[in-house]
Amino acid sequence: MQHYLSGRLSQYLLLLACLAGIAGLLASRALIAIAPIVGVVAALANPQLRRAVPGYFRNGAAMRAAAVVVFLLISGFYTTELLVWRHELFRDLTWLAVPLAFTLAVPLTRGQRLAVGSVFVLGVAAVGLATLVQYWQNPNAADEDILFGRNMPVFTHIFHITFGVMLALAAFGGLLLRRQALGRPLLRAALLAAAAAAALTLHILAYRTGLLVFYVALLAVVGRLLLRRNLLLGLGLLALLVLGPWAAYQGLHSVQRRVDATLWDLYQSRDGNDINDTSLSRRLVAIETAGQVIAQHWLVGVAPADARAAMMRQYDWRGFGLRPENRIEVHNQFLQAMVGGGVLGLALLLALMGWPLTRPWARRQPAIGLFLLMQATSMLVDAPLDLQLGLNLFVFGYGFLIVAGERRATEAPAGPAVQEAAVSRGVVS
């Protein structure tokens, strides 16, 4: 009872939800599903829940996340794929559960936030190193797979594209977290080593999307440093930005194979060859196919649940020589939002991605800008929100960094009574 009244129970449950979510992202779909539920329980365990509820409705980030579910509910009136719609509605409840947890539960302390971020960085690096061990057991065979457009499977069997993005996030996250004043020397050293391991893993395994995300983020960091006239570090990173890809190509067979496979893939489309066994060429024709669907349903789309069926119908009109099993949806989250939701769907996605950058408190936190930039970059070449792993990675980061960040920035210094009591006991920072 004392833990409940002091708010510790709510806070510990929120911490447990965060750690379970990270474990789920790295290894277990079951934990991905359970973590938001634990977060909601953490919110319900707040002894001053009724006082906290208005804060949820004042939190702009949480309201934009809730708008995703509202739009999906409205699309139920014109969808033709009711079974798919029900599945999508259940899956997208995470847009409600995660912001609820971060706005209604007793907030994490700075030390606990550092612990969550460190577990993510160290966990991603550990899975990356385990995958590298598998790679080095037979590097020639792995390189040959890369030459044919395949990817080294992740040690924990999660989707390689999302894991590549996670490696890029961990590389920059480790560098940001080691700057925290609460971090002890041993933790700072571990975070630096993990960041280096994540970047090295990304290059050796040549995950194409992850490398794109990594170097776009590095370019943004260089630009920020130069604008702030930190010339020495900025020019040093600029040299790394230029020399890094060249050195990787010269020194790593996997990167050479990836470049060769990418060029070969693009040549098939350019030369009008059979593209059934390609990746990028099929994505290019998927973009063209999506464009035809968007032109016919530009305002509200075909409904999110109908996006795949609409794409397949358009392929029936022009199939580009693709066999039915090789006809894919568009690998671009922004175009996918337009196929399913038209201009309104795209506007909602852009509001989610761009709104935080209009707030001074968010611009002061490099982690938020990097997270949104890296996610937006991955969305240009993939549709991560259509997959459970990609969706939960985005929503967890969105809740942890942006929803919780807005809550800290907008609450009065004294805060609700429960937070006053928690601060006095050293629970809440």
Image (cartoon, rainbow, N blue to C red):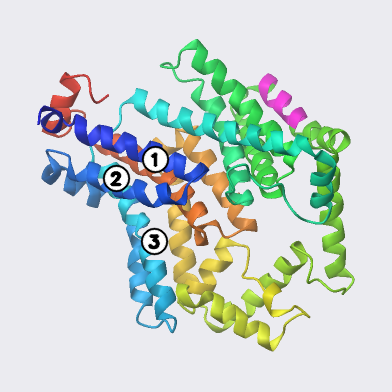
Numbered badge on residue 92: 3
Residue named by callout 2: 38
Instruction: Pick whichever, 188 or 220, lies toward us.
Output: 188
> Helix, strand, or loop for circle 2?
helix
Name the image quarter holding the N terminus: top left
Q: Quadrant of residue 73?
A: bottom left
Q: Nearer the viewer, mark 1 or mark 3?
A: 1
396 to the left or right of 416 = right
Residue named by callout 1: 20
Instruction: Pick whichever, 386 or 181, lies toward us.
Output: 386
In reply to whether residue 172 is colored magenta, the answer given is: no
Distance Cα–Cα, label 1 vs label 2 = 9 Å
Cβ–Cβ under 8 Å for marks 2 and 3: no
Cβ–Cβ under 8 Å for marks 1 and 2: yes
Residue at the front extreme of this rendering: 137
74 to the left or right of 154 = left
Residue 410 seen anywhere in this rendered image of the structure: yes
Q: Earlier in the sequence, mark 1 or mark 2?
A: 1
Q: Position of residue 384 (x, y in %)?
A: 55, 56
Distance Cα–Cα, label 2 vs label 3 = 16 Å
Check disc 1 and give the amino acid type: Ala
Check disc 3 and give the amino acid type: Asp
Highlighted range, magenta: 232-240
Callout 2 crowding tier (Cα within 10 Å): few <14, some 14–19, many ≥20? many
Check disc 2 and give the amino acid type: Val
> Helix, strand, or loop for circle 1?
helix
Callout 3 crowding tier (Cα within 10 Å): few <14, some 14–19, many ≥20? many
